[in-house]
Amino acid sequence: MASQRGSRARKGSGAHFDGAGRYTPCPVDQSLIRNFSIIAHVDHGKSTLADRLLDLTGTMPERERTAQFLDNMDLERERGITIKSRAVALSYKARDGKTYRLNLIDTPGHVDFNYEVSRSLASCDGAILVVDASQGVEAQTLANAHLATELGLEMLPVLNKIDLPGSEPERIKEQIESILTIPGEECLLISAKTGQGVDEVLEGIVKRLPAPKGEPDAPLRARIFDAWYDSYRGVIAMIRVVDGSLSRGDAIKFMVTGAEHEVQELGMYSPFMAATPTLGAGEVGYLITGIKQLAEVKIGDTVTLAREPALEPLPGFKEVKPMVFAGLFPVDADAYEDMRDAVDKLSLNDAAFRFEPESSRALGFGFRCGFLGLLHMDIIQERLEREYSLNLITTAPSVRYEVETTDGEILQVDSPRLLPPQQQVKEVREPFILATILTRAEFLGAIFKLAEDRRGIQQKVEYLGGDRVLIEYELPLTEVVIDFFDKLKSISRGYASLDYQLIGNRPSDMIKLDILLNGEVVDALSIITHRASAFQRGKSLAEKMKEVVPRQMFEVIIQAAIGSKVIARETVKALRKNVLAKCYGGDISRKRKLLEKQKEGKRRMKKVGRVDVPQEAFLALLKVDS
């Protein structure tokens, strides 16, 4: 039996190196395993700490060493942020003489990738909470700490960047005690950049974070927490084995989708793919079964043995709800099939990404996509363009409104084209968020004004000691998704941080604003906005459109309208040939005849001519000050 082979393999312990000098993991006892994640606010040093842990445990061969090794996506390196979680197995010989298996999961810090963090933490037993010793506790520090607490994880607090001249570890310890209620004496002081104190972090992981508590002899239950598609090997899934063991050659079943397959390969990243004959209870690794049908794999599904299945699946991950919606359309209509394959594969790797087919009179066939925020939308578009060689147009982002019609029907509207005519709408309810802002006291006035201008309702102002202030505002999500974060960073000179959570829908006076080119509605440019700001937005949009719509051989009239009422108009003058250039005098009637002939030709072209809308026109919607 394959399961018996797995049991025999698990009795062995230790590790060995392959011909290339890379560490290849072997199964170990649960008490010697630590599954942990690194969580922190953006740019507090998570990836740098991960690099030091790789170095100190000898996991990374000298010739393979690069800064932020686990951020191996081009976009991550260019932007300097972590986008995808990464798992890697480390082997560490502790001071007690025992060799431990440390399964590290590096996580993103930006609020748009919070779902990546929650999935990673659900596969761990503990977490390292990294705080910048100069900047202190930020909004995402607070959010991630609360998330870890809700999941019942043990936290190891670490103050990073103590080598900086502006570091104030004692003051930040007080912050951690007052805000996070974690005793200051438990904090480890380190510099991930220089390596100072990082060896104490390794000892802290072994001594202070718990070992897994699975049942080695129970039926197999393993949770899928990440997956991606490989052109040659099919779907590669990252799993955490909770109970039982899994071996190469086992027949397995996915408990949610019902698909059955044979295990072709098991292994761990250490830090490269290293095959192992079995994965025991408490271990984290990858699973390859040669699956080509993407629908057969679902993030959060439970893997069990086909012959001896578990009775109950493991709890899945909380279903994520997209907050921002936009249309993605291929510039070349013939690329629609390629785009459909691309979004299928990308959605496997990013469980927060949602999509459904959509058609537009202006842009043809594409997809209506759901994202967690504007940065998430930007990253998805860039990944589709880079990884799948697509050329895409993105429409204006929107949020999901709840619309009650006059006949009592409740509609979920995430696109302006789905909003019923005004006379059929009884009430529109828009999503509100509770925004938590951490900043310095000197920026309070500017932040209050920004929030009030965005229809915010102040809930709380709390002084945390020193010059740190915590502000809570209830804000409409539609006022936040486009440029609120950028403006917040600008007015606070980078010293404010933001986190938010959805709190429900509330009635608002929302209307549909259309953009017309030569009397024809361009559905892809329509937006839903609050009535109070509709005139200003319409005027600004018309002005922006005039700048980006190229001049044609005929006059282009740009209008912003609410229903049949035009509230703003701009005109793009036609390109004109000087038909009088060869007239050197003579009767004026000849000149008039030539001008009238040209005028009539322009009129005919205006009837049949099509205005090309460039990508810049859609980007202009994002740049209009709301």
Image (spheres, rainbow, N blue to C red):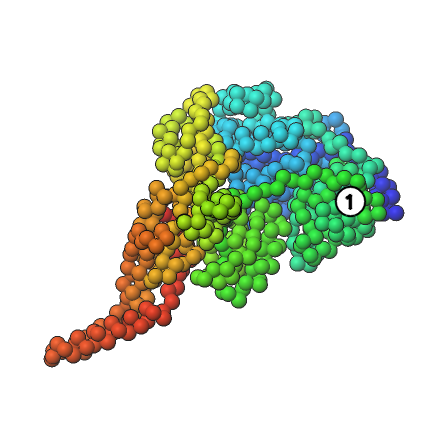
Query: Where is residue 39 drawn, in percent x and y?
Result: 58, 34
Residue occupying the point 72% across, 55% down: 291
Q: Which of 165 and 151 is in front in this view?
A: 151
Task: Find residue 516 and report its image quarter.
Answer: bottom left
Residue occupying the point 34% across, 61% down: 519
Task: Find residue 483 and report its image quarter.
Answer: top left
Asked if residue 53 shows in the view, the reply is no
Task: Find residue 85 and report its image quarter.
Answer: top right
Residue occupying the point 68% across, 32% down: 125
Up the image or down, 197 lies above or below 355; here it is: above
Residue occupying the point 38% across, 31% down: 448
Asked if residue 576 shows in the view, the reply is yes
Q: Is residue 142 left or right of residue 491?
A: right
Q: Is residue 315 left or right of residue 424?
A: right
Query: Where is residue 182 drawn, in percent x and y?
Result: 58, 22
Q: In this view, does 139 lie to the left or right of 539?
A: right
Q: Which of 120 and 136 is in front in this view?
A: 120
Kind of residue indicated by mark 1: Thr
Badge count: 1
Q: What element carries label 1?
A: strand
Query: Where is residue 242 drawn, in percent x and y?
Result: 75, 37
Query: Where is residue 270 drawn, in percent x and y?
Result: 69, 43
Name of the residue lying farthest toward the left: 586
Q: Mark 1 points at which residue?
A: 304
The C terminus, quarter of image: top left
- Dot 1 surroundings within 10 Å: few (below 14), some, or many (20 or more)? many
Q: Nearer the viewer, residue 441 or 74?
A: 441
